Amino acid sequence: MPIEHEGKILDIDPAAVERTILDKGGQKLGEKLMRRYVYDIVPGDMSKWIRLRDTGKETTLTVKEIKSDAIDGTHETEVVVNSFEETNVLLGILGFTAKSYQENKRVSFLLDGAEIEIDSWPRIPTYLEIEAGSAEEVIRIAGVLGYGADDLTGENTIKVYGRYGIDLSAISELRF
């Protein structure tokens, strides 16, 4: 299962961070509303789940497995599928029922080969996400943007919501 090298910097000022990314030579790729269904593989096991996500440009089906909260602690296997709705129906036929529907807004950038996202989710402050080829590269890009390794977390969205006192697993619909 491929390793995802991704770090988050929480509670950012989106306009200021966007200016910094662009000032450092980043390229803005666009803005989108993303929607997803999340399914348990084994009910109650928060370490592994299925995500069906529509980014507005493509729809992907992913198995995510959390090994740790480190920058390189998430493993994922992902395929592109043709239809958000039909894949949800197919998963239902296979016995998977979505435990939640979620939306977030994303502004995407490229900087020095890294994918940088400004992510806004309902009910919590906006955060920055940096994905690169290695944990060291995530830390380097964070440094370019004025952040240190201590500012980064590899926590998943459920744990990020938990920091704000919100049990995301208890929310069946998360919409703007």
Image: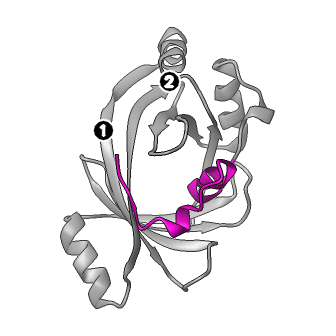
Q: From this viewpoint, is residue 52 visible?
A: no
Where disc 2 sits, the SS reads helix
Amino acid at circle 2: Pro
Rendered residue at 54%/20% (across/down): 17
Give coordinates of residue 100: x percent, y percent: 41, 68
Q: Is residue 46 left or right of residue 14?
A: right
In the picture as drawn, the residue positioned furthest to the top comes out as: 23
Give the label, 1 or 2, closer to the camera: 2
Where disc 1 sits, the SS reads strand
What span is in magenta?
Answer: 154-176
Rendered residue at 61%/45% (across/down): 6
Is-magenta flag for residue 111?
Answer: no
Q: Is residue 146 left or right of residue 36?
A: right
Rendered residue at 47%/17% (across/down): 15
Q: Is residue 84 left or right of residue 77?
A: left
Give coordinates of residue 23: x percent, y percent: 51, 9
Is-magenta flag for residue 172?
Answer: yes
Amino acid at circle 1: Lys
Q: Nearer the viewer, residue 112 or 87?
A: 87
Q: Quadrant of residue 138?
A: top right
Give coordinates of residue 162: x percent, y percent: 65, 55
